[in-house]
Amino acid sequence: MTAVATKKVKIALVGNPNTGKTTIFNNLTGLKQRTGNYAGVTVSLKMGLFKMGDSDAEMIDLPGTYSMSANSLDESIVLDVLNSRMKDMRGPDVVVCIADACALRRNMLLVSQIATLGLPMVLVLNQSDGLKKLGLAVDTALLEKRLGIQVISAVGTKGVGMAELKSAIADALERQRLMKSIFWPECVNKATAHLRHVLSERGKHMLESELHRLMFDAHSHENLALGVEFCFLREGIDQAREMIRKGGYNPLAAEAVLHYRNIDALLEGVVTKKGDVEASTSESIDHIMLHRLWGFVIFIGMMYLVFQSVYSWAGPLMDGIEFLQASVQNWVTPLLVSTPMLQSLVSDGVIEGVGAFLVFLPQILILFFFVALLEDTGYMARAAFLMDRVFSGCGLNGKSFVPLLSSYACAIPGIMATRTIEDSKTRLATIFVAPFMSCSARLPVYVLMIGAFIQPKFGALWAGFTLFAMHFVGLMVAVPTAWLLTRFVFKTKSQPFVMELPRYRVPRVRDVIWRMTESGIEFCKRAGSTIFAITILIWALLYFPQLTESEEQAIRTAFIETKMSAASSSPSEVMAALDQEGSATAKALRAQIASVQINQSYMGTMGKTLQPVFAWAGYDWKITVGLLASFPAREIFVSTMGIIHSLGGNVDEESNDLRTVLAQSTWQTGKLAGQPIFTVPVVVSIMVFFALCSQCGATTAVIVKEAGWKWAILSFTYMTGLAWLGAVLTYQMGTYLFY
Amino acid sequence: MYLSNLRPGERARIAFLDTQTAIEQRIAAFGLMCGEIVEVTRIAPMGDPMAVWCAGTEIMLRKSEAGSIRVNRL
């Protein structure tokens, strides 16, 4: 018996930003959502299932866009999905257009453009409860008659109109209801025909909508990523544009002008004045929110709240996760005592690795709670309006503010928050500079270095100043980096920063919680595995090759001998102390063994091999190993320094033992033999290195996820290069000037 | 006179777009086209960007972009 393959109905959801598209998507699909990733596309698309009659329908939520020009990544994706040009994805059977009922004219541009694709459509006039306040009324029956498709009046946040929408979708599919397409003037038709002819001469074929993109989009060449073989098209496009110009239209604005002309005819008598305009609440709120004094006071207050929540409030939750991780480790370790390698792998590799990405969850969830609130209320656009001036100089825009601010707590949620930036170039630049913001993981390194060297030597004032100054090192590098990136590296210019200031709205709890869980789940699913893999890799580099039993025995014997001569005690006394679990002597021996182990591990070998490179910055092989081992996360530097100096891994940045050991360590060989390793230039150089380096596996993993491998590798190389350069310059200049 | 020269509260009709780039297409998508009426609602505290009321919505744009939109004050 052959199984009958029931073809799932495919529905695409499109609309302008701020139309409540996602709310409708959540209403229809509920919990049955997943995020799809497609080859070569960094924008993830959300899919959801819902019941339509007896059959399942699949809905895809496309990125919000104002028009169909393929000038940005989001827009090209919308076009590709609707034109069935995506790899391994069929095009939709029905397109549901969501329009803001209160700004119908502008919203209709996208609708009118989509109508040219010849797909069955349904139009949803969302947020229609806002019409009354504006003193407007929309005659949906008349609009339906003019468009030839069903028009549903809805209020997504209240669930109004959802049942009607479902039946309208079924109806559009069944009757293949197409919206009447725009009637192009002769010159556009001629230009289109010309392009088609140019293509067919070379045996190529394109859809009409794609030909329109070539003619109407300013950067169609770069944006459509046409290969060399399409070079001949350049001339054809210029000729086509000339034809449009001769017809009396400016080729770049022609599309919008003609569509709006079409829309004005369609909406004639549909939108009518009805009653007086109530004083716009948004207008009066903005009077305060965008006030030149109070606006900033409110803004700073809100941003302080966001920052504090990520920086401090997440702390107890993160401690909780770390405590849980330690408890699991303590519980598992004794069970595997018979197989030391497995024990270490499970405890220091697997559990550590899972903990390594779970620990970021509180920050991500808290930040996205605020991001969802800021966006859904409409304040995010206002924040961008207030701050844009600061960022426009270096090629970013006002929307970069929240991601960069959060990166001062942690780059992971910060980079994820760049999703609020519509323009893909600006978003990439923001992702690229976010890891330069001085995150909280750098603090342990700064505190250790400042506490051990700056404070004792120069006093509390200089210690405070150094800590303060270190927070600016990254920022000083980030500004020119963003400028260079947006000016010279990106092939196409970023979109002009034009944005809607949406009306203020009361967010829906359900949507906010959705946004939080979604970001959390996606982080675990996609970045989790990479972070896990990095932790296992570093574990292996530190664990192998293992000390043999005889080597370990030799350390033990030597340890007992030194202990005996130092305390002039008998061997039996030392042995007794060693056997006593948890005694200082037993701990000291374990720390000694761990130190020899790291010395001869692959990581130790790598550190010694690479040391000459870091000798320029005045580092010995121990510091070099510390740098390498801290690749998963910067704060690991502190515990690695503990292990390597025979103090064990349980030291923190406040540990006096560690500070003393570091202060006392001297060069064993070379021309500096006998002199201290940690001079002030070396100490500052280490801090500069950590300010600029990319020693955070989780950040790299998140960049891979948000921007792709190419950018992750570029970011890692650039940051590491700069960190090394910064460290060497600091050391060399410091030594030259003061020593 | 350009859109960027207008002060908050002033209304104008768009006369001409001085650009031949993607900017033109982008702002046209927001309804900023020849013949449309715009009203400047406010200018950001740091002097840039500005917010204008056009086609039933409030839109923010930078002065650099507004500087390429020629208008006739009403």
Image (cartoon, rainbow, N blue to C red):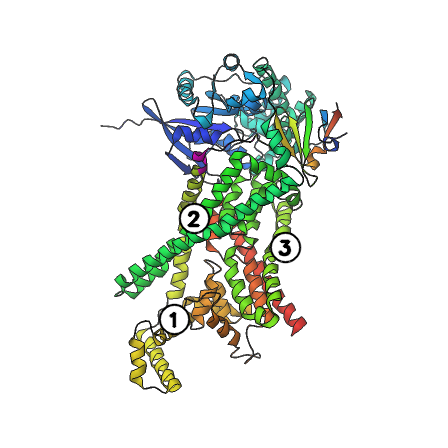
Secondary structure beneath dot 2 equals helix
Q: Amino acid at mark 3?
A: Met
The earlier-in-sequence mark between 3 and 2 is 2
Judge by depth and name the residue closer to the eye, A354 or A243.
Answer: A354
Q: Which residue is mark 1?
A: A594
Q: Earlier in the sequence, mark 1 or mark 2?
A: 2
Q: How many marks?
A: 3
Could you say where residue B32 lies in the image, as x and y percent from the top left? 66, 27
Residues flagged by tags 1 and 3 on a common chain = yes
Q: Quadrant of residue A162?
A: top left
The residue to which callout 2 is attached is A361
**What's the CA distance linking mark 1 and mark 2?**
31 Å
Q: Is residue A508 magenta?
A: yes
Q: What residue is drawn where x is 46% and y is 46%?
A: A364
Q: Could you say where residue A28 lies in the image, as x and y percent from the top left?
A: 40, 28
Residue A736 image-quadrant placement: bottom right
Q: Secondary structure at mark 1?
A: helix
- Regarding residue A229, the answer to whether it shows in the image is no
Q: Mark 1 or mark 3: which comes first in sequence? A: 3
Q: Amino acid at mark 2?
A: Leu
Kind of residue indicated by mark 1: Ala
Q: Which residues are magenta?
A: A504-512
